[in-house]
Image (tube, helix red, strand yellow):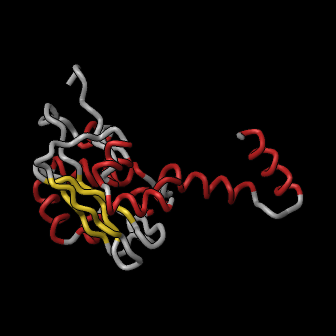
């Protein structure tokens, strides 16, 4: 696949259809400025800074934008905070509305009809498919993203990370944990 992409890029550049520098800038944008790293930084800051967490709960759009993550597909953000009693799961039942500034490009499965329909009618089954098993006492709340509102799940902070820096915490946050189909990484024995 990599060779095909490079061959296609070479042909398009040779014909003048694509500017290689512009393509490099676009790829760099998605790798370093837009994507799950941004959301991980939001989550890590919320875990480490109680004032930021409070602001995120009250006005997620402004709190997220304060870190420089805003723009199209991220204008109206709401944070759904996981607790020991409630786990949040995000879906867009009509299409694939997704918070690009904090999560980057949506995964293929997020846009699929089976995920979109099953997340609503069988959220526990969907979570099990992703390897997440929650106690029966834990409520699962499904949030339906729309063109007007996008959701970011704030996963629970892993135990044993109380003295960690925001940078170290951000490494534990996964894209799937911010959608609700996963959990943060375990801090491991070196925590």
Between 101 and 146, the one nearer to me in the picture = 146
Q: Is residue 5 above or below residue 118?
A: above
The residue sitting at the right extreme is 15
Residue 79 is left or right of residue 101, and the answer is left
Residue beneath the point at 49% across and 62% down = 113
Residue 117 is left or right of residue 171, and the answer is right
Q: Is residue 74 above or below residue 169?
A: below
Q: How many labels, in total?
A: 0
Residue beneath the point at 14% across and 31% down = 160
Mark yes or no: residue 34 visible: no
Q: Position of residue 181 (x, y in %)?
A: 34, 49
Mark yes or no: residue 128 visible: yes
Instruction: Examine the image and state in which quarter residue 165 appears.
Output: top left
Residue 176 is left or right of residue 108, and the answer is left
| Placement of the C terminus among the 4 image quadrants | top left
Residue 136 is left or right of residue 180, and the answer is left
Q: Position of residue 133 (x, y in %)?
A: 25, 40
The residue sitting at the top extreme is 189
Q: Position of residue 5 (x, y in %)?
A: 74, 46
Instruction: Examine the image and state in which quarter residue 188 appears.
Output: top left
Residue beneath the point at 82% across and 56% down = 13
Q: Position of residue 189 (x, y in %)?
A: 22, 20
Residue beneath the point at 14% across and 34% down = 159
The residue sitting at the bottom extreme is 148
| Placement of the N terminus among the 4 image quadrants | top right
């Amino acid at each position: 696949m990599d060779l095909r992409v490079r061959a296609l890029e070479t042909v398009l550049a040779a014909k003048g259809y694509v500017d290689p520098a512009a393509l490099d800038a676009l790829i760099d944008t998605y790798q370093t400025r837009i994507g799950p790293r941004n959301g991980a930084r939001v989550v890590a800051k919320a875990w480490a800074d109680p004032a930021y967490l409070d602001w995120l709960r009250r006005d997620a759009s402004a709190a997220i934008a304060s870190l420089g993550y805003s723009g199209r597909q991220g204008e109206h953000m709401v944070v759904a905070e996981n607790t020991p009693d409630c786990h949040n799961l995000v879906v867009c039942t009509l299409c694939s509305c997704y918070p690009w500034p904090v999560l980057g490009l949506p995964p293929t499965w997020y846009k699929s009809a089976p995920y979109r329909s099953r997340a609503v009618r069988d959220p526990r089954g969907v979570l099990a498919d992703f390897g997440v098993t929650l106690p029966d006492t834990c409520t699962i709340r499904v949030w339906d993203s729309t063109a007007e509102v996008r959701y970011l799940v704030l996963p629970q902070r892993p135990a044993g990370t109380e003295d960690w820096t925001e940078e170290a915490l951000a490494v534990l946050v996964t894209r799937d944990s911010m959608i609700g189909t996963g959990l943060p990484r375990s801090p491991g024995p070196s925590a």
